Amino acid sequence: DFLACKEPHTMTQRTLVLLKPDAVRRALVGEILGRIERKAGWTITALELRTLDRPILEQHYAEHVGRPFYEPLVEFMASGPVVALIVEGERVIEGVRQLAGPTDPIAAAPGSIRGDFGVIVRENLIHASDSEESAEREVKIFFPGRA
Ligand code: UDP
């Protein structure tokens, strides 16, 4: 009908992003942050370099406990510092997931972060919240002051 709008409704959100230890080790932090920063209107509102311990990773990856990849994943995520950040802006939850690409870097399209830089599934460079519920849960875990 004539009232239909071609643009999606405004939806300001926040999301929790981790640049995983492989991204830090390979000096890809600037490259990845740059891609996020260049999206119009998005803002990095918290940022920290930090080595994660087991308890925080067990909380973060609670939904994966018992899966065969869980133990190696936790070990990898504790193997060196990560960069944790909060990004705020229009449709940022879906948007950062799009920048990242699918979990398997070989399946991820060139142009995406995982598609451009990743090979193996575990070391896929970036975590990004997948829903508003997980974003709020994960912000509480990594930046309790921002809850
Ligand atoms: N992962 C893995 N093996 C798998 C599936 C996942 O090592 O078979 C790792 C990978 O690092 C992934 C993380 O576990 O990013 C969390 O998995 P999830 O399915 O939530 O993927 P994501 O949302 O990060 O794309």
Image (tube, rainbow, N blue to C red):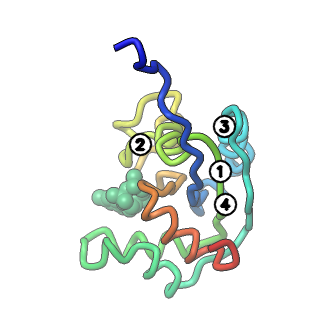
Q: Dot 3 lies on which element?
A: helix
Q: Dot 4 lies on which element?
A: strand
Residue 35, labelled with which disc?
3
Q: Nearer the viewer, mark 2 or mark 1?
A: 1
Give the Cα separation between the discs numbered 3 and 4. 14 Å
The residue type indicated by label 3 comes to Arg
Q: Residues within 10 Å of mark 3 (few under 14, many from 20)?
A: some
The image quarter containing residue 11 is top right
* Left or right for 37, reference 128: right
Mark 2 lies within 8 Å of ligand 1 (Cβ measured): no
Q: Which residue is nearer to you in this view: 111 or 141?
A: 141
Q: Dot 2 lies on which element?
A: loop
Task: Residue 137 in the image: state x and y as whole percent.
Answer: 48, 71
Residue 88, labelled with which disc?
1
User: What residue would you read off at disc 2?
Assistant: 105
Task: Residue 6 in the image: state x and y as whole percent.
Answer: 45, 18
The image quarter containing residue 62 is bottom left
Q: Earlier in the sequence, mark 4 or mark 2?
A: 4
